[in-house]
Amino acid sequence: MAADVKLTRLELDKLIENPKTKVIVCCGSGGVGKTTTAAALALRAAEHGRRTVVLTIDPARRLAQSLGLDELDNFPKRISVEGFEPAGELWAMMLDMRRTFDDMIIAHSDPERADELLASPFYQTISTSFSGTQEYMAMEKLGQLVAEGEWDLIIVDTPPSRSALDFLDAPKRLSSALDGRIIKMLTSPARAGGWGVRKAFTAGLAMATKAVSTVIGGQLLTDASAFMQAFNSTAGGFKERATKTAELLRSPGTSFVVVAAPEPDALREASYFVERLSDESMPLAGLVANRTHPTLANLPATKALAAAEALERQEGNGSPLAAAVLRLHADRAALDQREQRLLARFTRAHPGVPVVGVPALPSDVHDLDGLRIIGERLASAE
């Protein structure tokens, strides 16, 4: 790191060992190793004696693959490995948006009303296509895990894009939607055989198209009105849970970890995440700079390159192998310097954000042994 930049090191072992840490949310852009980081932290926390569950919102199967599983579902599955007995426990799951929505309907309705809502064609559409459903259901599932009280630590692996932070707004958006004009129009009694509903819907079409991304069937308006009139009586439970979820995200027991690669685009995304979390008063633990390329020697790139050229000029006495090694080192040192400059720029922009650099592995991580190595590097990297 540049000499003029004071770097605060992110100490992840202290974070995961702290009994007051109940939730860690890993966020970052795509392709930076966020899922691997979340899984490695969960494994390390289990090794340190905590009963840990890692929840992925990303529909890709990278988490299951890295844990040695064919698939994950909407309920925690315990991870066991022959010859490995952690002091704690490691569990994993993948968000099933529709299943979580169904469970929430059942929890906030009496059995008869729940059956009516779940059977509604309109519900069957919006449960998978309503704007913000995935983000809200992710926070609903997190709230359920916290309410169960079975876990020492919950680690959340968010989607690989800026929308990873959309769940920060999801509780507020849900509360606003339930109080919005389009909901009032849909819950108002139909008049003249439904003419009043159609007229109201036409007037609010611009608003409705922002809320509903998929429209199927000619009975949509009738189904929507019937669903919202039935749903309206259960809205209070949804809003109460949304409020609790928003409070959970800002609680002292929650920490956000931003994951980025030492590349310009990824660090720009990381800056966006950091600024957004600050604006929302969310508790940021720090930045994981993943897949860095530190050198094994302090020989500068320019000197290594000069030494390689000198060896190559020697006739008969030169060492092609040594020259090749020096050139490889020169390339690695130049890459390391570039990454250090980029991280120094990030630190100058966000001086209060702790950072830990994690050296890259020779290949991708596909098993628990690889996750354990990443966990060690997360804890020991300088």
Image (tube, rainbow, N blue to C red):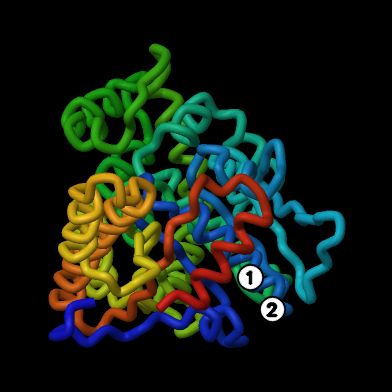
Q: Position of residue 97 (x, y in %)?
A: 54, 42
Tell me the crowding category of disc 2: few under 14, some 14 to 19, or many 20 or more residues within 10 angstroms, Cα based. some
Q: Is residue 256 in sight in this rendering? A: yes
Quadrant of the snapshot with the C terminus: bottom left
In the image, residue 250 above or below residue 329: below
Q: Are marks 1 and 2 in contact (CB under 8 Å)?
A: yes
Total marks shown come to 2
For this orientation, the residue located farthest to the right is 83
Q: Amino acid at mark 2?
A: His
Residue at 19% in and 70% down: 346
- Furthest toward the top, the residue is 218
Front residue (pair 324, 69)? 324
Percent x, y for residue 211? 30, 38
Residue located beneath label 2 in the image? 48
Residue 158 position, x and y percent, is 44, 53
User: Which residue position is annotated with label 1?
Assistant: 44
Q: In the shown orientation, is residue 117 left or right of residue 341?
A: right
Left or right: residue 178 versus residue 310 is right
Q: Amino acid at mark 1?
A: Arg
